[in-house]
Image (cartoon, coloured by chain):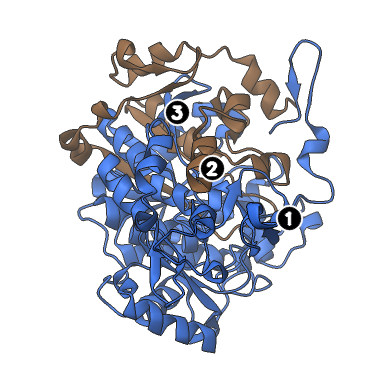
Amino acid sequence: MSTDIEIAHSVTPQPIQEIAQKAGINPEELELYGKDKAKIPLSFLNPDKQKEGKLVLVAAITPTPSGEGKTTASIGLTDGLNRIGKQAIVALREPSLGPVFGMKGGAAGGGYSQVIPMVDINLHFTGDFNAVEKANNL
Amino acid sequence: MIDNDIQNKDSKLHIDPRTVLWKRVMDMNDRSLRNIITGLGGKTGGFLRETGFNITAASEVMAILCLAEDFEDLKTRLGNIYIGDTFDGKPVFARDLHAEGAMAVLLKDAIKPNLAQTLEGNPAIIHGGPFANIAQGTNSVLATKMALSLADYTVTEAGFGADLGAEKFFNIKCRSAKISPQAVVIVATVRALKYHGGVSLKNLEEENIKALEEGVQNLDKHLDTIEHFGIPAVVAINHFSTDTEAEINWLLDYCKQKGVRVAVSDGWAKGSEGTEELAQEVVAAVESCKQNFKPIYEVSESIEDKILKVSKAVYGAQQIELSKRAKSQLKRFTQLGFDQLPVCIAKTQKSLSDDDTLIGRPKDFSIHIREFEVASGAGFIIPIAGNMLRMPGLPSNPAANGIDIDQNGEISGLS
């Protein structure tokens, strides 16, 4: 059986500009962080569209040591919605390095329901945690 | 800036170093930094002070970043951070140190949502990571609003069980951001329900319908909670290869008999092919949703009433008990005007109660509030029920032991 990282690496990420286009973002306005990561300018917030958008919250039963897989289910559901012709985006938290190197592991989903680039997302990603740390420690 | 102000003999603030609550943070598990003394080195090293480190995800700055609507709101919230008291017992806020502008500058890019993709090439917005016990435990408001601006359907998650993550999602995030979900998916697994039915971790792979019947009460409670909020629920049975057909069928039938939408979610093994049915159930639930969520409490109620309402409706508790310390803190917080904030109850994620050994659906219990903290910048009061570690330690055999990189830069062991 393949590990999560083997599955993640078996897929070549599409250029992030192409992903942006699927979400209706002009790739030229994207703030690129390498080939497969980017920041979305806040100018793409659209209050009218927000009211029409459907929001689905994924929660879980009381956690146990056996793991429930909320992130995996959220990613899977998003891919499933797109599969049945609904334009869907998944909105997730960024993993913390403590759990990644400690016990829980990363937070990029698992198996064939993962977000990529999985290694970067689990490590420094776009530096947000670093910025929070510096702002906190100022 | 706090220690610098204490060091500065011309400062007008007169911060009492013994009262400073603000801690430094870093993004790694390091238990030995939990409690430290700073200011060693004589006069030039500042004043000796007992303090500590939290993990970055537990920083109030993270909670603020994830609730901020724009730069103006970000600065206001950062300025409202309560850091300690003066020698006269007056509260000191970050704005008194004029820290909020520079803090916001450091967050100028961090405020923007990150774009990545799923393995199937669908857009994924990954942004912010606050804890789900002492903070709201869900991605940033701006990420959710960005996704809603760009897509017909936005799927988001809230940490831990629905008693912590979903409750805070509704009562804190949705209230603050004025958003409301049209469906809630409750992820359950046969293994976890058997665990709640009393099966030990090592025996979870054996078929055990009886344990499932017992443990399903935990799922029932979370479904009741979502009903309180008035939003339709869908149960997603996250499939594990060790689940037997009989167990899966029993759980499917159980949900159907209750009149709850349900589907097996098998994205782990099959990608979207394994989640098509779940997606259809979710669309049906969304289309059936006719209203915005109903909050469990109003912010204008007393702090005690807010805690009581969440404890009863969400945890299934009978009553709440406040320690002497908690009661005296409550008086001060009320004087400072913090009583009009929502509550972000910090309790164990392992049980619906505040006792992590009580699995399943515990009954006849009280929620014990040991003390309070306030995140006045983020905008909530944190009643603490139990021991909350804001700086975790590494386990005896950390995942780091199995993480490696080879000569070609190939990484292994991350999961």
Q: What amino acid is found at the position of numbered circle 1 in the picture?
A: Arg
Q: Is residue A46 above or below residue B27?
A: above
Chain with brown colouring: A
| Mark 2 or 3, nearer chain start | 3
Chain of the residue where label 3 is placed in the rendered structure:
A
Foreground mark, 1 or 2, reads: 2
The residue that label 2 is drawn on is A133
Q: Nearer the viewer, residue A37 or B365?
A: A37
Residue A100 visible from this viewpoint: yes
Q: Which mark is residue B31?
A: 1
Q: Secondary structure at mark 2?
A: helix
Alpha carbon separation for disc pair 1 and 2: 17 Å
The residue that label 3 is drawn on is A79
| Same chain? Circles 1 and 2 | no
Residue B348 shown left or right of residue A93 in the figure: right
Q: What amino acid is found at the position of numbered circle 3 in the picture?
A: Asp
